[in-house]
Image: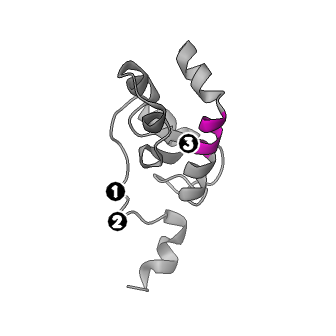
């Protein structure tokens, strides 16, 4: 993690962004539905945003955040754009409940 990562992740704005990302995804991994050991992940990686000279609005854009468990986040690495389609994604923990509703 670069010095810039550390500086950004220590800012109050980051902590609010993280809380909002987790809440927005109902505190579950968007890939597998896990509810433990969750990370707020930048879809366009923080390293790319830093390299591009992103503004605060870009660094803390909720549309660029997703909740991943440690395992899914580790598999993702610094890949760009690996996010579920927010229009069609259903949290796996609710999928069985909603299956008969449509």
Instruction: Confirm whether the magenta stretch covers residue 32.
Output: no
Residue 96 percent across, percent down from the top left: 49, 75
Identified at 58% across, 61% down, the residue is 26
83 sits to left or right of 91: left
| Quadrant hosting residue 93 | bottom right
| Quadrant hosting residue 13 | top right
Element marked by disc 3: strand
Residue 46 percent across, percent down from the top left: 46, 28
Element marked by disc 2: loop
The residue singled out by tag 1 in the image is: 85
Cα separation, mark 1 vs mark 2, equals 6 Å
**95 or 61: nearer the viewer:** 61
Residue 1 appears in the figure: no
Find out whether the residues at labels 1 and 2 contact each other: C-beta distance under 8 Å: yes
Magenta stretch bounds: 12-18
Cα separation, mark 1 vs mark 3, equals 17 Å
Label 2: few (<14), some (14–19) or many (≥20) C-alpha neighbours in 10 Å: few
Majority secondary structure of the magenta segment?
Answer: helix
Q: Which mark is residue 40?
A: 3
Residue 21 appears in the figure: yes
Q: Which mark is residue 88?
A: 2
The number of numbered badges drawn on the structure is 3
Q: Earlier in the sequence, mark 1 or mark 3?
A: 3
46 sits to left or right of 3: left
Identified at 49% across, 64% down, the residue is 92
Residue 12 percent across, percent down from the top left: 66, 35
Label 1: few (<14), some (14–19) or many (≥20) C-alpha neighbours in 10 Å: few
């Amino acid at each position: 993690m670069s010095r810039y990562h550390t500086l950004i992740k220590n800012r109050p704005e980051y902590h609010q962004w993280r809380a909002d990302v987790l809440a927005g995804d109902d505190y579950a991994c968007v890939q597998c539905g896990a509810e433990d050991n969750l990370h707020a992940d930048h879809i366009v990686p923080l390293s790319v945003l830093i390299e591009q000279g992103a503004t605060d609005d870009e660094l803390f854009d909720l549309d660029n955040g997703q909740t991943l468990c440690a395992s899914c986040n580790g598999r993702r690495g610094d890949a760009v754009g690996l996010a579920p389609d927010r229009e069609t994604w259903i949290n796996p923990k609710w999928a069985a409940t909603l299956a008969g509703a449509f």
